[in-house]
Amino acid sequence: MSTTIPVYLTITAIAAGSGLSRTDARLFLTAWENLVITELNAGRAFSIPGLGRLIPRKTNRTNAQNPRTNTNIGTRLIRRVHLTPSQRAKDAMN
């Protein structure tokens, strides 16, 4: 099972790799996050160099059935994010 890297280690790695202070690295990461979320909420794909593209997708409404009452229940429309990996990311995994 894979584990997630804690945010403080990500900030430390950005600071060490770029020569920024940890505070500046945290501000950069927050600004990057806000930019990605704004673009995805607007329905636009977002490209991350070396990693791939984040593409917003909508799921179709489906019908489900309540087993107790046998009534049909329509599920709601959900927006999801799909990652299309770049060739560099695919090569790094194999």
Image: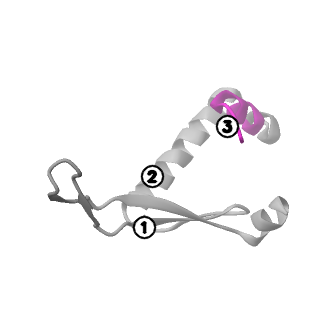
At horizontal 14% and vertical 51% (from top left) the residue drawn is: 69
The reply to whether discs 2 and 1 touch (Cβ–Cβ < 8 Å) is: no
Q: Position of residue 80 (x, y in %)?
A: 43, 59
Label drawn at residue 45: none
At horizontal 76% and vertical 72% (from top left) the residue drawn is: 87
The residue tagged 1 is 57
Q: Amino acid at mark 1?
A: Arg
- Give above or below for 8 relative to 31: above
Numbered range of the magenta stretch: 1-14
**Closer to the observer: label 2 or label 1?**
1
Q: Amino acid at mark 2?
A: Ile
- The secondary structure type at the circle numbered 3 is loop
At horizontal 71% and vertical 41% (from top left) the residue drawn is: 1
The residue tagged 3 is 4
The residue tagged 2 is 37
Answer left or right for 49 relative to 73: right
Answer left or right for 57 relative to 64: right
Q: Position of residue 48 (x, y in %)?
A: 64, 61
Q: Amino acid at mark 3?
A: Thr
